[in-house]
Image (spheres, rainbow, N blue to C red):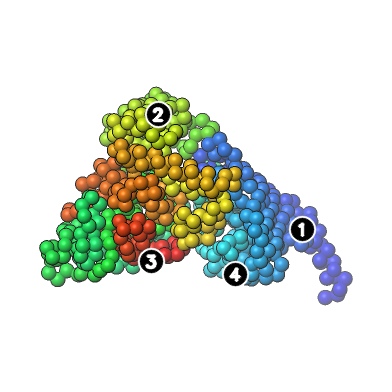
Amino acid sequence: MPVFLSCLIAAVAGLWHINQPAELGTLRLHYVQKPIGYERYSIARDASGVTLTADFDFTDRGGRVQLASTLRTTTDYAPIAFTAKGKTYRFVNVDSQVRVDGTTATVVADGAESKVPVDRTFYTIDGYAPFAAQMLMLRYWKQHGRPRVMHTVPGLPVNDVIIEARPAETVSVGGKAFSLEPFVVDGVVWGRETLWLDTDGTLAAAITRAGGLSFEAVREDLEPALLQFVEHATRERIKDLETITKSVEVAHTGDYALVGATVIDATGRDPIQDAVVVIRAGRIADVGPRSTTTIPADWPVVRVDGKTIVPGLWDMHTHVTQIEWAPVYLGAGVTTVRDMGNEFEFITALRDAVASGRVAGPRLLLAGLIDGGGPNAFGVYYATTPDEAKQMVAKYRAAGFQQIKVYSLLTPSVVAAICAEAHRLGMTVTGHVPAGMSIEQAVAAGMDQIAHLAIRGEAGTPEVESTIAFLKQHRTVMDPTQSWNELLGHAAATPIAQFNPGVNKIPSPLNRLFSNAGSASIDAATARGRVERGLRIVRALHDAGVPVVVGTDEGLPGHSVHREIELYVEAGLTPMQALQSATIVPARAMKLDRELGTIEKGKRADLAILDANPIERIQNIRRVRWTVSAGRMIEAAALWKSVRFEP
């Protein structure tokens, strides 16, 4: 080809890129399906590449979250430079810069600079936002051979991202059909996201998580189809959990006997040395010393010499918004959890899948969230009048929820109506103390349980003693979530591993997220002082006879349950009392103590088999070797590994 013709073609191509109009897009952002803000992006092209600028902006419960991002790529979307600064959630700060030079990425994240070798196929993104960056990542993946694993930066030092295209589907809005291609993205955040591209490669919708709860982004013209996207993603995630369940080998099921361990039954009785636990059809058929306990003839015997068996643990305050929580909880020895507010469609489907035995996971007890409405309300289920309160309670009751969770913006009269209707229908009520009500007023209105440690002041003062006496009189159950307070309130200069070593075992995206938690405005002594103040109140509640139950509000998946138990020992509870706060005490609070909570004949075979005795050293609660859930015995390490944790 003549040189002048080559130059002419190049010039025309350059002009075509320069004259292309910018690709503009707007995504409506939703948190637990509530519309809360927008992401607006612009994609400009020139002869040398593509420039994405994105403005991610939402307001959640009165708090504004903003993230400004720029991504520069080659014409085929290979990353050149990336910057992101702001927040992606209330406690998740992002301050990242990436420059790519050949096979090296210079990464500046959270004030530290590093040189990271990168493969031929990699991408630059820091968390789920901006969604437009994920859109370009998918375009890049499609144009570069659809690699099975793709590395992204920033990470530790990289994140391993797996992208899978799923069969095309059609979404209908206003009588118009849209053909969309769904993709499952695993590793940008911990766990699986679903993103949909249209036939032009434009992002139509995304379902992910932010701050532990479900987060949705939908193109404005497709917003009426939000529920269709949620339901599709839910079906796909349950299928994924079925696949994970099949990949984790069940060590024993059916009828068998555990022989040789020390059994701590959580009744308060002395441990049973050299014990036998006989399991028949998912229940405890017998338990006692080997010398006096009969093992049926020809039954399989599982030797667990040197181990310690405790009842399966409980987490009484969590939000199981992704399937990956199910194997994590079992890996941590947790066999029952109470979900304290979630996406209705997802959590009911997951509960039913676990109950059916199709997927492995802890038993799910559900508390349905109700807030008071208005721009700062949480979720999408509101009650502003007593009649609306009755309707909301009826909806949750019909769906098999055990409790109602009241939230911050409810008025006193509506709280009273919720409690009365819930009690009439055989449900109990938990949740936050609404703004404008004292803890005494909330309990007097009918709240049976209280989430978080809603007691101000110092243990031992007349005011706090009066409040505790009031809670004792009303048999109120307290869910303090001290591990959550410690995690979010620690001094930023204090490594999380200093108080929760589980952080060293979590996947890279989670570690990136929690590395930004904590407060830069306080020192370690002040932060610890706040934790100790809370622990003194926990001790005072327990000593007064107020039931205290272990709850985490998520935190470090699985590991925060262990940390909550450890904190109760730091508060002054004995190791046995701390163990009971995660076993029999929550079972009683949920009126399931005839079924769960202790290792006794006739109860469900929910057990944690530990490598060491937690009564001797409470940190041994972390040393789970196997978990038995309804008789199915599974190796803890395999459960952790199935969702990218280190065992």
Mark 2 and mark 1 lie on one chain; the one further toward the N terminus is 1
Q: Secondary structure at mark 1?
A: strand
**CB atoms of marks 1 and 3 within 8 Å:** no
Q: Is residue 441 above or below residue 540?
A: above
Q: Quadrant of the N terminus?
A: bottom right
Which image quarter: residue 104? Answer: bottom right
Determine whether, in the image, residue 294 is placed left or right of residue 225. left
State how far apart marks 4 and 3 are (Cα). Answer: 31 Å
Q: Is residue 363 above or below residue 438?
A: below
Give the Cα distance between marks 1 and 3: 49 Å
Q: Is residue 325 visible?
A: no
**What residue lies at 49% left-to-right and 57% top-to-bottom?**
497
The spot of residue 131 in percent (x, y) is 60, 52
Badge 1 local density, few (<14 within 10 Å), some, or many (20+)? Answer: some
* 3D distance between C-alphas at marks 4 and 1: 24 Å
**Disc 4 or 1, which lies upstream in sequence?**
1
Q: Specify the amino acid type for callout 2.
A: Glu
The disc labelled 4 sits on which kind of residue? Answer: Gly
Identify the residue position indicated by label 2 in the image.
463
* Circle 1 residue: 46
Of the two numbered discs 1 and 3 in the rendering, the one whose residue sits closer to the viewer: 3
